[in-house]
Amino acid sequence: MIRSVLKGCGSYLPEKVITNDDLAKFVDTSDEWISTRTGIRQRYMAAEGELTSDLALHAAEGALSDAGLTPADIDLVIVGTTTPDRTLPATAAILQDRLGMSHGAAFDVQAVCSGFIYGLAVADNFLKAGQHRNALVIGAETLTRILDWEDRNTSVLFGDGAGAVVLCAEESAGAKTDRGILSTYLRCDGRLNKLITSDGGVSETRSTGYIRMEGREVFRNAVTNIAEAIEVALSDADLSIADVDWFVPHQANIRILNATAKRLGIPEEKVVVTIAQHGNTSSASVPLAFDAAVKDGRIKKGDLVLFEAMGGGLTWGSALVRL
Ligand code: ACO
């Protein structure tokens, strides 16, 4: 059988840091409220003229060099993003050009905060089907561009960044201990599409609109959906919580992470948490957290890693990977 083996990772954060105290100077909020309710202490903000494709390019170059590959080796580029450079074409096409490529396929996936997990599952299926050999999967966002700074319900939560992984199709005996993606699980409940949305869009208003969120309602759904995503990924691979070395969740709220860990009996020390530094970077959040834990030596080759996310749609999903 073919497995999609994760060969490299990379990430990028813009230079500018905005602390909670910085925000409190122009939004009616406080460091105390933001850190106790969300766990966020700071977030990064792209510079004027620094685009989603710029962030994605840095992350992609890092992942390629980590994998020991060049753009010539890649034949599939998938970018998960809610904040594309332009309405069209796909940011993946712009990125492909920046990488000096004109071969293979490139497209964006729009699943809001679940964008990276959706992209990973799509790439995994293309690789397993034999249609492509080596994929770059990226989550990249400039969410600060669609924040209404006067809306304290949303403006304190989100930040910019990008993370990337390289997946390579390899022959495998298919054992649980063999490298590669063991299972993926994707869900959406479109009835809840208004819980995280924008108050505008190309077709509706000929503009992008700003992020709007019914935070309390999203919170209510989050723990149940994330717990389901983790349980299904594990049962599909015939593994249990105890087998997982690292949980790399979407970084939306520390209280959601803690409540999920408590409900499923996940030891806190196995959960990678970057929310304090990064804030919620939507589709970039999982690959950013993953890259941070690989680079600081926590996550190692051979480890079993569970990625999960939930976001606008509502979408949610998971991926179980043996590194
Ligand atoms: N600073 C100070 N006070 C605030 C702020 C702020 N930034 N924001 C809200 N408040 C106030 C509210 O006005 C409210 O005041 P009131 O009681 O006088 O009406 C009070 O704080 C409590 O507000 P809640 O919304 O109930 O606060 P809650 O504890 O639910 O926290 C939060 C809000 C952080 C948004 C939380 O609900 C949450 O994290 N939800 C989930 C978000 C999530 O998971 N998103 C994931 C996907 S995101 C994506 O896909 C793009």
Image: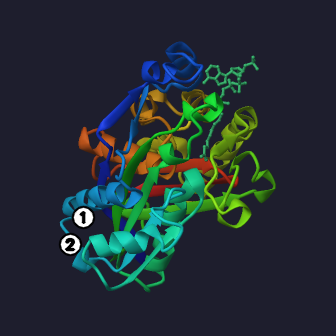
Determine contact: label 2, label 1, CB under 8 Å: yes
Image location (x, y in percent) of residue 75? 34, 80
Give the residue pinned by disc 2.
Answer: 70
> What is the C-alpha distance between the residues marked 2 and 1?
6 Å
Earlier in the chain: of badge 2 and badge 1, it is 1
Q: Is residue 168 visible?
A: no
Q: Quadrant of ligand 1?
A: top right
Give the residue type at disc 2.
Thr
Q: Is 296 located above or below residue 321 in the figure?
A: above
Tell me if mark 1 has few (under 14), some (14-19) or many (20+) residues whose alpha carbon lies within 10 angstroms of its own.
Answer: many
Give the residue type at disc 1.
Leu
Give the residue pinned by disc 1.
Answer: 64
Q: Nearer the viewer, residue 301 or 59?
A: 59
Q: Quadrant of the C terminus?
A: bottom left
Q: Is residue 276 visible?
A: yes
Q: Nearer the viewer, residue 43 or 283?
A: 43
Q: Is 3 located above or below residue 271 in the figure?
A: below
At a point 64% along the width and 32% down the height, the residue shown is 151
Image location (x, y in percent) of residue 249? 50, 43
Residue at mark 2: C-beta within 8 A of ligand 1: no
